Image (cartoon, rainbow, N blue to C red):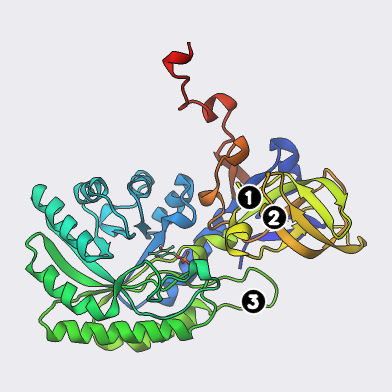
Amino acid sequence: MHHFDYRDNRLHAEDVDIAALANKIGTPFYIYSEATFRRHVKVFSNAFSGTDALVAYSVKANSNLAVLRILASEGTGADVVSAGELARALHAGIPADKIVFSGVGKTTEEMEAALNAGIYQFNVESAPELEALDKVAGELKKHAPVAIRVNPDVAAGGHDKISTGRKEDKFGVAWGSARALYARARELENIEVKGVDLHIGSQIADLAPFEAAFKKAAGLIADLREDGCRIERLDLGGGLGIPYGAGEIPPHPDDYAQLIKRVTAPLDVQLIFEPGRMIAGNAGLLVTKLVYVKEGEARKFMIVDAGMNDLIRPALYDAHHDIIPVTRDLDAKNDRYDVVGPVCESSDFIAKARTLPDMKPGEFMAIMSAGAYGASQSSQYNSRPLIPEILVNGDEYAIIRRRPTFDEMTALERYPEWMG
Ligand SMILES: *Cc1c(COP(=O)(O)O)cnc(C)c1O
């Protein structure tokens, strides 16, 4: 559930009238509802109340500092995948002892930063990474708390590009070599084995792949304990899907929690979760303006002022985002349109062959479910400035990232001396 609704046919974010805001600050922009973030965190955390669980929000879904501060105030931790995300999480007030560090390519500099910060856990994804971490920790005279990310070879995720737990995927340690790597980890002086980690993908729409993967993990924990390994944590990753369109009904966090409690109760481990999309996805939308309606020979196009540099999910994952008018005309006729951006790429589209109410240039539309992997994946391709991010709280709003100026966009660039 989210807090974006029509009032008198005008779309509101909580109590803020979006059309009025768009007229004031200009489009395109992202707009987030603070109440929705808080609600999603509570729904997820409450589902696991009574169990020892750490919810480590996946920072890559939406890494704006103000968003991270909301989550910090709800007591969540963070799952980071770079030194930059680590710095953001700490800056926003997420304590180091609630931060886990995932990712296949951690550099020694990133390991150093994380060890110096005193993070809760490294999710190690390969044998060479484990050796490197041991070495860095030794140099700093520290111990690195580690879970090994295992690849359960389970197909899941709404799209080939967001499935991560099959043996063809680059993530995690192959199932067959996990036990041996744990044995190696126990030999390493500066590594403290804490747990088992897995993350099978994103936007997972049913519970079956979770169940298959989690049962395999439970089996692995039993084997590792037999080998004499102390396993006290089980990190189950993120991946719970959200509804992007009508008719899509992802599993409810309560059902997900029931499944997990059933599979993990006998294990006596602390559970760690890394939800991203489930927290942020429906807490934000992208507001854009219709610039032109173009009648092609085969199709009609709505050309809008948001492009793939602002929201790349349709181009990258064939993702569906609902599109609704910001000011609704209930008598408007419908037609089929391709909704496309201004970027010079054929893959710059937001929707294809979508039935939408007729709108006039200058009118605003909202691209729904854009709070996760929207702003955080945006770029300045085509030298289009990063777009503002707005946070709403009741009838108040704040610009939590403003649009850069041309000077700011080019501030890091220099003409070489030889050009005079
Ligand atoms: C991306 C990612 C997540 C978050 O996935 P969601 O689908 O947004 O919940 C969690 N853990 C890891 C390791 C990830 O890479």
Q: Residue, x 39% and y 54% (percent of image)?
A: 72
Q: Residue, x 32% and y 60% (percent of image)?
A: 104
Q: Residue furthest front?
A: 418
Placement of 314 over or under 107, stated as above or below: below
Query: Which badge, 2 or 3, is on the more N-terminal residue?
Result: 3
Placement of 262 over or under 305, stated as above or below: below
Residue 90, numbered label: none
Mark 2 element type:
strand
Residue 308, numbered label: 1
Front in this rendered view, residue 231 or 69: 231
Circle 2 residues within 10 Å: few <14, some 14–19, many ≥20: many
Q: Gap in Å between the C-alphas at discs 2 and 1? A: 7 Å
Placement of 64 over or under 144, stated as above or below: above
Pointer 3 residue: 248
Q: Position of residue 27 (x, y in %)?
A: 70, 41
Front in this rendered view, residue 191 or 341: 341
Mark 1 element type:
loop
Mark 1: which amino acid?
Met
- Residue contact at pointers 2 and 1, CB within 8 angstroms: yes
Mark 3 element type:
loop
Residue 349, numbered label: 2
Mark 2: which amino acid?
Phe
Numbered disc in front, either 2 or 3: 2
